Amino acid sequence: MLFFEHIPVGYCSEVGSWQLTAPEVIEFAKVWDPQSFHTDQEAAKSSVYGELVASSLHIFAICTKLFNDHSDRIQVMAMLGKDRIKLLKPARANDLLIYNTVCVEAKPSKSKLDRGIIVLSDTLARDTGEVIMTQEVTLMVARSPEHACQ
């Protein structure tokens, strides 16, 4: 468990990895983003992408799952925002995605001693290193019990 004081500026972690599959891309998109380049491999060939690609909503869901499953689970009280989201490349069926994060800002709350605010700069990339998405996420994080009253 990671509390606010365990996450200084410069803290970095490989959050996790995810193997995308065509059936998963199609199944997710049929429910949440039913555009043909997400749901139909043949139709996707004539799209701007030229092949089946994952929905951006699917990418966000994968990042959320990997973050929540991460072994260094950060004690998040609330997500306060997502900023500077850049979708640089499409995520393709069969891509192995790697999610990394680095803390770029950390400040204790001035009014609530039991928490602090951190900003994480996230990168989602293919296993080849090609970056697919970047974002900044602002989180309210609990302080450890021994620091919550200081």
Image: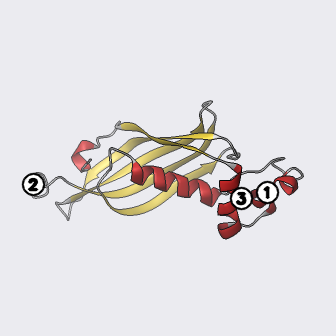
Check disc 3 and report its element: helix, strand or loop.
helix
Task: Tell whether 126 sits left or right of 3.
Answer: right
Q: Mark 3: few, some, or many residues within 10 Å (few <14, many ≥20)?
A: many
Residue under label 1 = 37
Residue under label 2 = 150
Q: As drawn, which residue projects farthest toward the bottom? A: 31
- 3 or 2: mark nearer the eye: 3
Quarter of the view holding residue 12? top left
Instruction: Inspect the image, locate mark 2, and give the three-letter code of the amino acid beneath it.
Output: Gln
- 1 or 3: mark nearer the eye: 3
Where residue 7 sits: x, y (%)?
A: 29, 43
Write the residue at 14% across / 57% down: 148
Write the residue at 64% across / 56% down: 56
Q: CA distance from mark 3 to mark 2?
A: 50 Å
Where residue 130 sits: x, y (%)?
A: 64, 34
Task: Tell whether 95 sits left or right of 108.
Answer: right
* Between 7 and 92, the one nearer to me in the picture: 92
Q: Mark 1: few, some, or many residues within 10 Å (few <14, many ≥20)?
A: many
Write the residue at 59% across / 53% down: 59
Q: CA distance from mark 1 to mark 2?
A: 53 Å
Where residue 86 sits: x, y (%)?
A: 61, 49
Task: Tell whether 42 sits left or right of 19.
Answer: right
Quarter of the view holding residue 42? bottom right
Nearest to N terminus: mark 1 or mark 3? 3
Residue under label 3 = 26
Disc assigned to residue 136: none
The color scheme shown is: secondary structure
Instruction: Inspect the image, locate mark 3, and give the three-letter code of the amino acid beneath it.
Output: Ile
Task: Tell whether 98 sits left or right of 120.
Answer: right
Instruction: Inspect the image, locate mark 1, and give the three-letter code of the amino acid beneath it.
Output: Phe
Where residue 55 sits: x, y (%)?
A: 67, 57
Nearest to N terminus: mark 1 or mark 2? 1
